[in-house]
Image (spheres, helix red, strand yellow):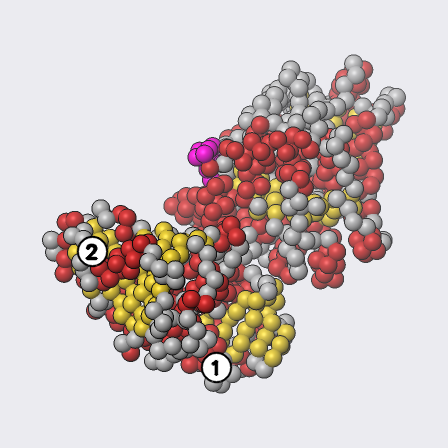
């Protein structure tokens, strides 16, 4: 047998510095040459037990023996009743072992238990007073060969299996090869005196484990030496789950080869690649695949399994990394524990500022948010609209680019956001770099060749485009890599848990060959209706953590939070470190002026009042009546036309709420409308626009109906004013061109509707007035449309104005719905803004459905008519 003297050893092992694997480079070579191994661990735990077991199979082949001492601290008061104290302590130790299921997967722990069972290994538990701190935090080991050679090592007591195998343990080494070494003698003397219970009064007793602890230790024994993980599975009639080179591997060691049985993993085996007899490559390693798919199905089928050491470490490492990021991100978000992150933040700012334009610097709060995202790697920005989420994303990318952590951005979002991503890039990187863009809306015909042949800095895809596995495969192959900053803009567009598009994205992200490390979800409305709206967002950001550290945010937990205040509190606490949120007031955006409901208010003519009354008395259902009254107020000729589904866009979300028998125009109503070619409200609005344009002001006009947009544009044109119109009939390229003309050219009026342009467009640099010619009950559209001209970047003293056109009430006769709609909108807006302007995640605001709102307003309208 080779001796210990043959080894070439270092005086100190610091693997984090020199990169050496201490298990293969030190522990195993020593055990192969030893006939005895004495080991003192600083404490007893499942982790310490795993560490102590490493490599002992090598010693068994030499006929060697082992002595282990595990320390346990006790209080001085417990020393007076030491027998009761150590039984109580050992019962606690047994319970800890039982709570660590991975011990049953460790064949080396099985071997240690077998050696104890057969008398080849002795274990003692040393109870030490807390005052004996130097011993309680010491670990040491002594190897002896059959030639008189001795090697000892000592180090601090922060030992874990992960720490040992990931090279995080530092220790010093001594030997007797060149004569007496006092450090070695001290180590040997310390172990022997603790073993014999003569070390010090503070070490009162060293005892063999008994009772529950002994029974628990023995439960891991397989009553023979287990040679390997595969051997353990053979003996336990189990399947081995392994991770090797980033792939999950399954090996069926069951006697009946149960993976062949159709009920076990049947729906998945066709996707796994056979790599040997009853061995499968299950795909790229991720926690979801191991925990949910493989382990979940094996448990459901009653099949035994073991996780290999590599698989256990893969899962532990993933959980550890997220926990550490969450801890640091929480400190950053709350601006506490600056000793942990302030220096890093200063470096971050210097890098971002060096790579972005000094003309358009990130504000301090924006910089802080970008830094938070860099630490978390995957996170969300739930800042209110108008606070610069796109700008923050580019600040983050500047840092990642500098550190070679990202070399491209891939954005998924609505088509409306594309122009903002291009414009903001030009601003923030002005004079520093020019990004190249791939815009899917510009390459519908030849997108495949473009993606294969061009490498761009920023890729823009709309959510609707990703609708087939072929597209997913192409993006995975040519676009997405681990050095991609992946951004989901307006992530609430994918809130439908069972939606086709949402599920397509979930499948896509799980199958990407080289998944992006940095992911960012952006939305100003994270909880449109409920906590459940966050489910998809969380799965996109943390696909491998939802069954681990983030299990408290499962779909079931989110659903419960919608009903239970205590559950909602727990969910909000779990969400806290995963997002940032900035309000306009945080960035000192000048608040808009109060809504002006007077400047464009008018009294309807007698004919108009008769028209309102005719609609009311028509017998139409509430929804059709509601729409017809809005049309009568702004554009009476619309009443001569049948309603189309487009007319309901932005008014109701669910087409099932529409009574299609009510779409046809009513002849009696159309006849009255024919006598009113132009409403008083339209006339007053056009006069107002002409006046404001005359003094050099640009204005955006919001309508609901395309015919109204066209009518207003024609009336302005007749007054010599060019107006730009944007609505659903425009292509994305046309929209962007028109927006650019409005912002940088001569046209002073932009006519549009909120379902086309309410999101992702910034007009605040050129436009400070908005006119609402038509409006419905969709509060989200109203708030988003207001944010187009009230955003971060407004200069001090710049004011924002919102004008609402209202057809009021004659002294005798019916009124329009305008005042009733505005009253209800204002009530909803006050409630929503109180939540939105909170720094915390706004709780879901339970608003009535659109139909309920319409029924209520119709009831209010009827009450007013009866007075």
Q: Which residues are magenta?
A: 330-339
Instruction: Give whichever of 128, 297 is nearer the camera.
Output: 128
Judge whether residue 156 is colored magenta.
no
Q: Where is residue 368 shown, x and y percent of the image?
A: 56, 33
Q: Is residue 494 above or below residue 711?
A: below
Element type where label 1 sits in the image: loop
Determine whether label 1 and label 2 are within 8 Å by CB. no
User: Can residue 611 be seen?
Assistant: no
Q: For this rendering, which residue is in front, 146 or 818?
A: 146
Q: Nearer the viewer, residue 160 or 817?
A: 160
How crowded is the residue under tag 2: few (<14 C-alpha within 10 Å), some, or many (20+)?
some
The residue lying toward the viewer, choosing from 711 and 282, is 282
Residue at horizontal 61 percent and vertical 21 percent from the top: 590
Residue with the most extreme left position? 80
Query: In the rendering, at what x and y percent does residue 489 appear?
Result: 65, 43
Magenta: main secondary structure: helix
14 left or right of 736? Answer: left
Q: Quadrant of the C terminus?
A: top right
The quadrant the N terminus occupies is bottom left
Q: Position of residue 691 (x, y in %)?
A: 78, 16
Query: Which disc, if any, is residue 396?
Result: none
Q: Is residue 387 left or right of residue 35?
A: right
Mark closest to the chain's N terminus, 1 or 2:
2
Q: Secondary structure at mark 2?
A: loop
Residue on which disc 2 sits: 199
Q: Which residue is mark 1?
A: 254
Where residue 235 sits, quadrant-wise, is: bottom left
């Amino acid at each position: 047998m080779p001796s210990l003297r043959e080894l070439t050893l270092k005086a100190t092992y610091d693997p984090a510095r020199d990169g050496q694997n201490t298990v293969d480079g030190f522990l195993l070579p020593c055990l192969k040459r030893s006939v005895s191994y004495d080991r003192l661990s600083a404490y007893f735990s499942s982790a310490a037990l795993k560490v102590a077991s490493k490599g002992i199979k090598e010693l068994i082949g030499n006929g060697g023996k082992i002595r282990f001492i595990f320390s346990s601290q006790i209080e001085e008061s417990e020393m007076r009743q030491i027998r009761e104290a150590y039984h109580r302590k050992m019962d606690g130790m047994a319970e800890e072992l039982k709570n660590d299921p991975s011990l049953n997967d460790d064949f080396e722990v099985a071997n240690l238990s077998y050696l104890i069972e057969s008398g080849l290994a002795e274990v003692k538990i040393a109870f030490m007073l807390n005052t004996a701190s130097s011993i309680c935090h010491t670990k040491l080991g002594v190897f002896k060969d059959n030639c008189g050679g001795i090697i000892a090592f000592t180090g601090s007591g922060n030992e874990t299996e992960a720490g040992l195998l990931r090279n995080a343990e530092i220790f010093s080494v001594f030997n007797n090869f060149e004569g007496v070494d006092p450090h070695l003698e001290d180590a040997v003397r310390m172990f022997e005196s603790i073993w014999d219970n003569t070390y010090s009064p503070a070490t009162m007793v060293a005892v063999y484990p008994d009772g529950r602890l002994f029974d628990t230790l023995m439960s891991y024994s397989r009553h023979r030496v287990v040679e390997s993980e595969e051997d353990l599975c053979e003996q336990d009639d189990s399947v081995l789950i392994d991770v090797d080179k980033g792939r999950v591997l399954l090996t069926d060691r069951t006697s009946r080869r149960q993976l062949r049985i159709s009920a076990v993993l049947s729906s998945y085996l066709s996707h796994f690649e056979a790599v040997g007899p009853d061995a499968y490559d299950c795909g790229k390693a991720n926690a979801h695949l191991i925990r949910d798919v493989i382990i979940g199905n094996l448990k459901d089928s009653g099949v035994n399994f073991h996780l290999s050491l590599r698989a256990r470490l893969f899962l532990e490492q993933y959980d550890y990394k997220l926990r550490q990021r969450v801890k640091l991100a929480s400190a950053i978000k709350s601006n506490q524990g600056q000793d942990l992150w302030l220096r890093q933040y200063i470096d971050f700012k210097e890098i971002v500022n060096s790579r972005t334009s000094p003309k358009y610097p990130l504000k301090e709060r924006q910089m802080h948010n970008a830094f938070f995202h860099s630490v978390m790697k995957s996170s969300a920005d739930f800042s209110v609209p108008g606070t610069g989420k796109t700008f923050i994303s580019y600040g983050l990318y500047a840092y990642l680019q500098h550190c070679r952590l990202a070399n491209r951005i891939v954005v998924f979002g609505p088509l409306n956001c594309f122009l903002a991503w291009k414009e903001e890039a030009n601003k923030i990187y002005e004079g520093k770099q020019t990004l190249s863009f791939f815009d899917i809306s510009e390459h519908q015909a030849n997108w495949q060749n473009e993606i294969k042949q061009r490498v761009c800095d920023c890729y823009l895809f709309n959510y609707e485009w990703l609708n087939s596995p072929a597209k997913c495969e192409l993006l995975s192959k040519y676009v997405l890599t681990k050095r991609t900053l992946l951004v989901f803009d307006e992530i609430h567009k994918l809130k439908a848990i069972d939606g086709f598009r949402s599920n397509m994205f979930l499948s896509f992200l799980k199958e990407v060959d080289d998944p992006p490390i940095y992911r960012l979800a952006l939305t100003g409305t994270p909880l449109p209706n409920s906590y459940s709206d966050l489910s998809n967002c969380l799965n996109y950001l943390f696909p491998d953590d939802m069954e681990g550290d983030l299990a408290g945010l499962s779909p079931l937990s989110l659903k419960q939070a919608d009903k239970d205040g205590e559950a909602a509190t727990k969910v909000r606490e779990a969400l806290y470190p995963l997002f940032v949120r900035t309000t306009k007031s945080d960035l000192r955006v000048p608040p808009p002026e109060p809504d002006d409901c007077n400047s464009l208010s008018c009294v309807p003519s007698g004919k108009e009042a008769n028209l309102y009354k005719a609609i009311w008395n028509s017998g139409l259902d509430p929804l059709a009546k509601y729409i017809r009254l809005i049309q009568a107020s702004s554009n009476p000729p619309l009443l001569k036309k049948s309603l189309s589904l487009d007319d309901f866009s932005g008014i109701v979300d669910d087409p099932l709420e529409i009574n299609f028998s009510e779409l046809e125009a009513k002849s009696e109503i159309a006849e009255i409308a024919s006598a009113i070619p132009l409403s008083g409200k339209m006339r007053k609005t056009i006069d107002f626009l002409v006046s404001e344009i005359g003094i050099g002001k640009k204005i955006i006009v919001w309508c609901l109906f395309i015919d109204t947009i066209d009518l207003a544009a024609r009336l302005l044109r007749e007054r010599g004013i060019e107006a730009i119109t944007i609505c659903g009939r425009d292509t994305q390229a046309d929209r962007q061109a028109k927006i650019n003309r409005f912002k940088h050219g001569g046209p002073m009026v932009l006519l549009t509707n909120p379902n086309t342009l309410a999101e992702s467009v910034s007009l605040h640099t050129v436009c400070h007035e908005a006119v609402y010619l038509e409006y419905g009950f969709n509060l989200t559209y109203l708030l988003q449309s207001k944010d187009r001209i009230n955003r971060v970047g407004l200069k001090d003293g710049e004011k924002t104005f919102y004008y609402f056109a209202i057809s009021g009430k004659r002294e005798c006769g019916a009124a329009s719905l305008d005042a009733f709609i505005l009253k209800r909108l204002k009530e909803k807006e006050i409630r929503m803004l109180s939540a939105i302007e909170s720094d915390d995640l706004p709780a879901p605001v339970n608003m009535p459905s659109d139909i309920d709102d319409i029924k209520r307003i119709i009831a209010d309208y009827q009450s007013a008519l009866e007075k």
